[in-house]
């Protein structure tokens, strides 16, 4: 029995017309991971419900029956290092890796997803077309335009697509540098009829995403996912999930959330409520009350990250009744000063109270997310995190406490995009580990080396393209990247420039021609506000 035959669909695919546009839609990872991506599910289902499209899915380990001559081959990119799988899949179809080397016989290669919307530049050479923003807004105009120019030559197709809001055609923009190892001096379109800036497209409706397929073969087995909110109103200064996806949107309760949940619970008893800050939906308490009804006694409920000061005993009790064992909250630091710098509007006593409420409601564990290496952080701030965790353990001794901790990584389109990674991040993670594990608190550090690679890609420009291809041959360890930098010395800036260096706000950024939710002047103001606390 194939994995596709075990899927339970929550939509009805249409029968494509004879001249339907043949599309391969790929997730550059294994099926069990890709099918758990809500974004991938929704785009696939949207395409499968169009009569003028015939869509086939492709993963690294399995595929549906693929068209002989696809017009489009698309990738949903959620993790930076999945670029390796994109290149391998292109090679498997004998498609040149660089868009400039493709001819009329090749499909147009398009991509979307959070990685490419944030900063597509390190990967720009691999794609003909990149969709910036929300699929709900982009997909209809993208497909309609491709249909209009389908019979034209490749150059004409790309120029037509570049006129569509939110569609970025990297080959139609030229990047010049002060020197091979210097900063960017200018990014400009190659023709006057190509837009100088590409504006990310934002869906502003109140019907958000929900699973289109449920399967036991997903990484989260048989889960039905519902997007409760999109973006986050807190706007922590480092947070891509907030800044890139503004404004904060919430699903309508009666018109969207409840019908979606009722539909999903017809095929599974496992429900996941998704969003960067789910509990900030204004009717979240009503939603929990609804899910606590007797007919949902068999439902297993999980909630993604919740805001600390919204954790009530009632919430914890309902979640515990629905087989949730733990809650996940992002606290970032135990230092009041650091939280002011990053705009985390939280007090330590609110964090302690969240633990007390979670324990009283019957939950068994509390997972917290922290961060080291925030601009302006000092050693005393690390000690404050230790003290806060110890006090939390005293206040809620029955809870299993876990602190997952990463190193600050600068992200495009946030006020902290100009900061580099602090080199003592690794030392601070080791210090926290030593102090917390000795007190019986589970500490789970994210790899500092992975943070370095993340920062490289998140602040990278087009000069990284040959480096990415080299590291793919060497393996994706930090050592591989350093080896590639050594080999390409003189052709691009050093690792230090991309990863650790603080950049001036007057500098041309790799993504300066790509406009996200807020203009640079606003980000600079938020940066100044943050540094007033440092």
Image (cartoon, rainbow, N blue to C red):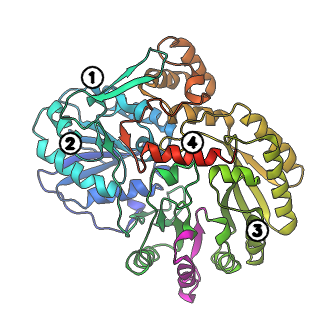
Comparing labels 3 and 1, the label whose residue is closer to the camera:
3
| Residue at image coords 49%, 57% | 217
Give the labeled residue for mark 1.
Answer: 101
Q: Which region of the structure is painted magenta?
A: 280-305
Is residue 239 in sight in this rendering?
Answer: yes
Mark number, residue 484 = none
Contact, mark 4 vs mark 1 (Cβ under 8 Å): no
**Sequence-earlier tag: 4 or 2:** 2
The residues tagged by marks 2 and 1 sit, at their Cα atoms, a distance apart of 23 Å
Comparing labels 4 and 1, the label whose residue is closer to the camera:
4
Mark number, residue 416 = 4
Give the labeled residue for mark 3.
Answer: 355
Q: Is residue 515 above or below residue 399?
A: above
The residues tagged by marks 4 and 3 sit, at their Cα atoms, a distance apart of 30 Å
Horizontal and vertical percent position of residue 229:
48, 66
**Sequence-earlier tag: 3 or 2:** 2
| Residue at image coords 44%, 56% | 246
């Amino acid at each position: 029995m194939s994995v596709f035959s075990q899927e339970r669909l929550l939509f009805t695919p249409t029968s494509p017309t004879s001249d339907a546009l043949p599309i391969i839609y790929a997730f550059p990872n294994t099926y069990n991971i890709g099918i758990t991506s809500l974004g991938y599910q929704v785009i696939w289902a949207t395409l499968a419900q169009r009569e003028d499209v015939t869509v086939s899915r492709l993963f690294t380990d399995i595929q549906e029956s693929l068209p002989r001559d696809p017009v489009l081959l698309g990738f949903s990119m959620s993790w930076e290092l999945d670029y390796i799988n994109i290149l391998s899949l292109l090679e498997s179809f004998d498609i040149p890796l660089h868009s400039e080397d493709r001819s009329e016989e090749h499909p147009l290669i398009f991509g979307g997803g959070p990685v490419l919307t944030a900063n597509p530049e390190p990967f720009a050479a691999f794609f003909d077309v990149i969709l910036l923003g929300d699929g709900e807004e982009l997909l209809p105009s993208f497909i309609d335009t491709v249909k209009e120019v389908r019979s034209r030559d490749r150059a004409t197709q790309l120029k037509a697509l570049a006129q569509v809001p939110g569609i970025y055609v990297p080959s139609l923009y030229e990047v010049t540098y002060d020197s091979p190892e210097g900063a960017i001096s200018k990014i400009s379109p190659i023709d006057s009829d190509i837009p100088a800036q590409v504006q990310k497209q934002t869906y502003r409706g109140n019907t958000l995403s929900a699973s289109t397929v449920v399967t036991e073969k997903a990484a989260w087995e048989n889960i039905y996912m519902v997007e409760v909110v999109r973006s986050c109103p807190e706007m922590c200064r480092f947070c891509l999930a907030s800044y890139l996806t503004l404004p904060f949107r919430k699903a309508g309760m009666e018109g969207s959330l409840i019908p979606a949940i009722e539909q999903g619970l017809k095929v599974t008893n496992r429900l996941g409520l998704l969003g960067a800050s789910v509990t900030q939906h204004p009717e979240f308490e009503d939603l929990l009350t609804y899910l606590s009804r007797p007919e949902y006694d068999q439902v297993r409920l999980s909630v993604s990250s919740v805001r600390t000061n919204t954790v009530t005993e009632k919430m914890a009790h309902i979640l515990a009744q629905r087989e949730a064992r733990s809650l996940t909250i992002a606290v970032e630091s135990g230092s009041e000063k650091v939280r002011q710098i990053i705009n985390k509007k939280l007090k330590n006593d609110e964090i302690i109270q969240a633990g007390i409420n979670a324990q009283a409601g019957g939950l068994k564990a509390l997972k917290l997310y922290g961060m080291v290496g925030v601009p302006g952080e000092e050693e005393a701030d690390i000690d404050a995190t230790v003290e806060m965790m110890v006090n939390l353990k005293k206040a809620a001794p029955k809870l299993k406490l876990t602190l997952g901790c990463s190193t600050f990584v600068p992200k495009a389109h946030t006020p902290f995009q100009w900061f580099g990674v602090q080199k003592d991040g690794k030392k601070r993670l080791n210090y926290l580990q030593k102090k917390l594990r000795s007190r019986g608190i589970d500490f789970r550090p994210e790899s500092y080396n992975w943070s370095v690679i993340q920062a490289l890609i998140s602040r990278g420009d087009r000069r990284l393209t040959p480096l990415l291809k080299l590291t793919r041959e060497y393996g994706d360890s930090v050592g591989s990247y350093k080896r590639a930098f050594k080999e390409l010395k003189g052709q691009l800036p050093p690792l230090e420039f991309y990863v650790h260096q603080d950049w001036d706000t007057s500098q041309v950024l790799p993504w300066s021609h790509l406009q996200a939710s807020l203009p640079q002047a606003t980000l600079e103001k938020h940066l100044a506000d943050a540094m007033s606390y440092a």
